[in-house]
Image (cartoon, helix red, strand yellow):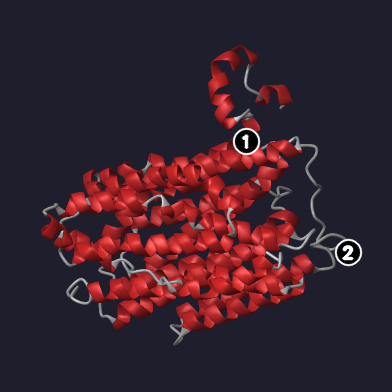
């Protein structure tokens, strides 16, 4: 297709001038990237339905939900493997379109299974893994296309900005809808509606247009480049072997399977960091990032309790999700420049401290603080969500800044990929620690008596990463970070 066919018609330029001042020029070639990011954000449409499905249909305990969350975090730590496969091993001659379709097909199959045949914990885990892998592969392709469809260096930043906007817009667009659908058409029908998302991604594939300025396909058998000398085969082989090893441990119900996988994953990422040439500053940055992301959460026990004891229904939970999504975007827009300009240690300090303080009302709600204040539980929860939501997006910004500042010259892309794997592995660790806490405090749908003490413990543990900030501050003082 000629390039002029992918641009906005000149006749409408005057009408679009106000929009262009905010988002810049948009070409049709951006569509596959933006649709993929939007679909991932809009996957939150199943958020409320999943809570009720886990609670009522599968009768999963909060500890079991956290255990499933551990396995669902692992595919995101294997993005490098999917990236190497897409770069070096085309399917029927296609490096991007075929993989985008493959990812969409995985997600479509997972949603179809949830809507029809899933009735046990095992089948639920399998369906969710398919969905997660599908979105992970789509995300990898979208990341690559965000560079390859750009015709100038300036366009790369433009596409990245639009991509973040598409992701957040996707989440915002389905916030309230997620609760409305779960309440009015049921959870399985909501999963069926979510099948539209991978179909949208598949429909965008014909619009993929690789720019002539894009780098040529990588040659895994060559000696030049970051994937030369058999490195691509090594990364792909190790990644696939690691995936098979993880699946085998879960299928065989091996004792301490999650702990073993976590240790092996950390060892592999540590090896990659060593191969890149890790410095003291990078080691401290990696430790800080892992510690901040690995702190445990309360888990689904709080949601279960709010549904059973406070009567929070699907539509109200959808409303809270809508408010949280909108205010997360607002918080990112308002505080973004301030966070970037301040030292990372300063930003992490006040974000963690503010998060802990703003977590106190949730604990108060469990102990009846709203009744003492004469406020209904729903009003109290709405006010609490309104206050805390802006922090949701702010925690990621200092992490990305820290990675950028410690990346070696010429190895920025590799460092981002490895650190992204580390950040996602830390989320799996967080789910593992969450399972430990829920098991230790014995929080179940039949007994919520220990939930308050669990919440207090989680709040205290959330402050532990602050102990690492003096190390980071010393690195900043020496100019290494």
Position of residue 291 relative to residue 226, above or below, is below
Q: How crowded is mark 2: few (under 14 residues within 10 Å), some or many (20 or more)?
A: few
Position of residue 30 relative to residue 238, above or below, is above
410 or 480, which is in the foreground?
480
Q: Name the residue under label 1.
A: 30
Classify residue 159 as left or right of residue 164: right
Element type where label 1 sits in the image: helix
Classify residue 279 as left or right of residue 34: right
Element type where label 2 sits in the image: loop
Residue 409 disc label: none
Q: Dividing the image into 4 quarters, which one contains the C terminus?
A: bottom right
Q: Position of residue 3 (x, y in %)?
A: 73, 26
Position of residue 394 relative to residue 124, above or below, is above
Instruction: Name, please, the residue furthest toward the right.
Output: 223
Point 14% across, 56% down: residue: 373
Q: Where is residue 406 in the image (x, y as percent from the top left)?
A: 69, 63
Q: Mark 2 points at which residue?
A: 223
Classify residue 174 as left or right of residue 87: left
212 or 299, which is in the foreground?
299
Q: Where is residue 329 in the image (x, y as percent from the top left)?
A: 45, 44
Point 43% across, 83% down: residue: 253
Position of residue 288 relative to residue 227, above or below, is below
* Label 1 close to label 2 by CB (< 8 Å): no
Q: Position of residue 68 (x, y in %)?
A: 40, 70
- Report how far apart the C-alphas of labels 1 and 2 lie in the structure: 33 Å
Point 80% across, 39% down: residue: 213
395 or 167, which is in the foreground?
395
- Give the mark, 1 or 2, whose residue is nearer the N terminus: 1
């Amino acid at each position: 297709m000629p390039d002029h066919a992918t641009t906005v018609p000149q006749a409408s330029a005057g009408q679009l001038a106000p929009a262009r001042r905010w988002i810049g020029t948009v070409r049709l070639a951006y569509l596959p990237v933006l649709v993929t990011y939007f679909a991932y954000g809009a996957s939150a449409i199943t958020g409320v339905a999943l809570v009720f499905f886990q609670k009522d249909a599968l009768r999963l305990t909060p500890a079991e939900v956290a255990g499933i969350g551990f396995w669902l975090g692992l595919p995101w730590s294997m993005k490098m493997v999917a990236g190497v496969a897409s770069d070096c091993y085309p399917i029927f001659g296609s490096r991007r379109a075929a993989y985008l379709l493959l990812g969409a097909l995985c997600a479509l199959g997972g949603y179809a299974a949830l809507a029809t045949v899933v009735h046990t914990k095992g089948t639920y885990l399998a369906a969710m893994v398919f969905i997660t892998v599908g979105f992970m592969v789509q995300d990898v392709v979208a990341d690559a296309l965000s560079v390859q469809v750009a015709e100038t260096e300036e366009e790369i930043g433009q596409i990245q900005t639009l991509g973040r906007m598409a992701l957040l817009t996707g989440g915002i667009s389905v916030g309230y809808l997620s609760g409305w659908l779960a309440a009015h058409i049921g959870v399985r029908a909501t999963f069926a509606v979510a099948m539209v998302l991978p179909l949208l991604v598949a429909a965008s594939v014909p619009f993929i247009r690789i720019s002539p300025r894009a780098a040529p396909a990588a040659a895994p058998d060559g000696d030049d480049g970051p994937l030369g000398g058999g490195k691509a085969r090594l990364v792909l082989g190790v990644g696939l072997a690691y995936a098979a090893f993880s699946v085998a441990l879960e299928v065989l119900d091996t004792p301490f399977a999650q702990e073993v996988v976590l240790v092996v994953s950390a060892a592999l990422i540590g090896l990659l960091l060593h191969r890149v040439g890790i410095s003291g500053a990078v080691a401290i940055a990696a430790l800080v990032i892992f510690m901040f992301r690995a702190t445990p959460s309360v888990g689904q026990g709080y949601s279960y309790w709010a549904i059973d004891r406070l009567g929070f229904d699907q539509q109200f939970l959808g409303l809270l999700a809508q408010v949280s999504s909108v205010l997360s975007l607002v918080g990112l827009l308002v505080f973004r420049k301030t966070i970037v300009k301040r030292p990372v240690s300063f930003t992490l300090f006040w974000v963690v401290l503010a998060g802990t303080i703003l977590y106190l009302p949730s604990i108060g709600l469990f102990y009846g603080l709203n009744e003492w204040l004469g406020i209904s539980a729903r009003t109290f929860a709405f006010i609490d969500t309104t206050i805390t939501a802006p922090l949701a997006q702010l925690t990621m910004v200092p992490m990305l800044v820290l990675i950028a500042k410690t990346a070696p010259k010429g190895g920025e892309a590799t460092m981002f990929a490895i650190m992204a794997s580390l950040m996602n592995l830390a989320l799996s660790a967080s789910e593992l620690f969450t399972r430990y806490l829920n098991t230790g405090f014995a929080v179940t749908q039949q007994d919520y008596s220990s939930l308050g003490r669990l919440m207090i413990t989680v709040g205290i543990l959330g402050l532990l990463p602050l102990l690492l900030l003096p190390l980071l501050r010393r690195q900043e003082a020496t100019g290494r970070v």
